[in-house]
Image (tube, coloured by chain):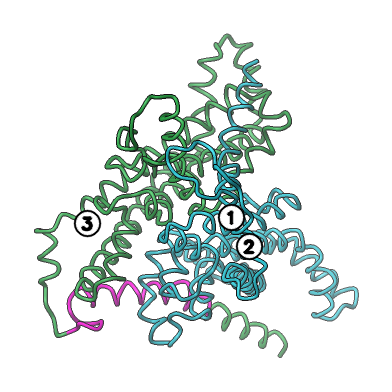
Amino acid sequence: MHSRLLIGLLMLLFGLPFGLLGLLALAQGWHFPQALPPAYSLAALRTLGAADSELLAGLGRSLLLAGTVALLATAGGFGVARAVARSRWSRQWEAASYLPYALPPVLLATLVQPFIIRLQLSGSGGGVVLGLLLVALPFATLLLRSFWSVQAREYEQLARTLGCSARQAFGRVLLPLAWPLLRTTLFQTFLLAWFDFGLTNVLSVGKVRTLTVQVFSYVGEANTALAAVASLLLVLPPALLLGLNRTALWRRPG
Amino acid sequence: MALDIRRFFSTTLLGGYGLLVLGLPLAGLGYALLGSLGLAGPLAAGFTPRYWLALGANAGLLYSALFSTWVALVSVGVSVALALSLVLRAQPTLRRWPLPGLLYVPLLLPALVLAFCLFQLLSGAGWLARLSYGLEWIGSPADFPELVQDSAGLGIILAQVLLTFPFLTLLLQAIYQESRLDELRQLSSTLGASAGQFRGRVAVPLLLRRAAPTLLLNFIATLGAYDVPLLLGRPHPQMLSVFVATRQQFDLRELPMGYLAGFLVALGLLALIGILIKLTRRHAL
């Protein structure tokens, strides 16, 4: 009995935002004190199909930015984690990797903004990618650090002893072994960039209109229908990732 | 030769990495310090301590710090209490479908989207206010209690709890299983301990000690939250990230004060992390 009540309560609590977003996306002329929309319309959803759809452009921009950050952070993190594991100052490098976490992303963005401006990257996608990498690269490094253990080195040495070149040992032995962790890192860094609003908004001065920036902008304009559609679009990739791999959503470096 | 090339590649890679993750933030911190002293930034006109002296007359930053601490303490405290009670009192339900999968659902929501939903739900003209009006509990939106953009930060706290407690429940449940707490419970029961004694003297201390680093990161993340307070907070008092970002974005004359606030908040957070890491290490299992 208690168990069913608990499950019912949590389903209601967690389902409510999704139900509300659906209603807001479809509602037409829904004002106080109406508890339910007086009419429904697909107008907000149809904007996605328009040739000059700002939402569709935002979706593409967000996918491109998050995809680029995920690829760069995962590939870079794999290499850096290997270098960290083999460095004499391994523990110090690991400790240093926590620095970007110590500071909230928006604070980090305000601190590095003068340099982004000097590099003439302010308001550009490149500046946002650099800012996001500041958080995503150390995150990937910490997550992938666990792979470069003594065991990985022994596997590599074994492959070399058996006649593999350095490239073959990397491509045919180490990469397949690391693939599950690399996949998780790819998912997590993608989500990190996908969910980001503050850092992107500060570094791009609102010019790089990703989906999160658009949600905020539509909320400011009191355009709840488009804000709801943009919000639903934001939920889609994480939902797909959840279907593919649960650990993609909650594994943390440690 | 090949070894030398690999070492050179490794050193270069680490150098570049250090420049990005250490060099850039630390240079930003230095720039903020110089900016607060009038030595850097677009308004730089030579050394002046006036922005530092103005801190004494302007309590905005202090209020922001206190407000952020209040929100972070209550949010993390409530989230931990909820997660602990689920893990310790609903163990069979937590292992059965659909709860393990259900707890992942809030992790799909970006903080900004959850804040938007809560605003639509809890504001004076929101969905709960409409239901209350329909039930004749209120006569106008103004009669509905202030649950968002309120002085106590209730809306922000609620959003942070909804974002944090499912994650903490998954984390504590994983620790519960890894630490074989079920077996410990049976053992303590055989030795005569009550269920309450097992929870209070064995399970809770063990779970909290093992989860301490993550709880610490969560506390820091909530302290520096931006998306949720931007939508659900009010202009005064602001949470720290909003306070710093607003001063650096909108008014050029406020820029040195923004640099000063950014410098002090970053330094304060680094010091806090240092202290908390020492404490968690000292009390670690």
Is residue B159 rendered to the left or right of residue A246? left
Is residue B16 rendered to the left or right of residue A117? right
Tell me the distance, in whole angstroms, between the alpha carbons under discs 1 and 3.
32 Å
Q: Which mark is residue A145?
A: 2
For the residue labelled by badge 3, is the local secondary structure a helix, a strand or a loop? helix
Q: Residue at x 76, y 53 (%)?
A: A244
Amino acid at the residue labelled 1: Pro
Judged from this view, the residue extending furthest toward the bottom is B1
Any part of residue A82 in sight: no
Q: Are marks 3 and 2 on the same chain?
A: no
Q: Which mark is residue B61?
A: 3
Q: Are marks 2 and 1 in contact (CB under 8 Å)?
A: yes
The chain letter for the residue carrying disc 1 is A
Amino acid at the residue labelled 2: Arg
Q: Main secondary structure of the magenta part?
A: helix
- Whichever of callouts 2 and 1 sits on the residue coming sooner in the sequence is 2
Instruction: Check residue A147 for magenta coloring.
Output: no
Q: Nearer the viewer, residue B227 or B194?
A: B227
Q: Is B41 drawn above or below residue A39 in the view shown?
A: below
Tell me the distance, in whole angstroms, between the alpha carbons under discs 2 and 1.
9 Å
Q: Nearer the viewer, residue A121 or B3?
A: A121
Q: Look at chain A in the picture and name its colour.
A: cyan
Q: Residue at x 15, y 54 (%)?
A: B59
The chain letter for the residue carrying disc 3 is B
The quadrant of the image that shows the N terminus of chain B is: bottom right
Mark in front: 3 vs 2: 3
Q: Which quadrant holds residue A138? A: bottom right
Q: Is B149 drawn above or below residue B45 in the view shown?
A: above
Q: Are marks 3 and 2 in contact (CB under 8 Å)?
A: no
Q: Are marks 1 and 3 on the same chain?
A: no
Instruction: Write the start and end of the magenta stretch as one range.
Output: B16-44
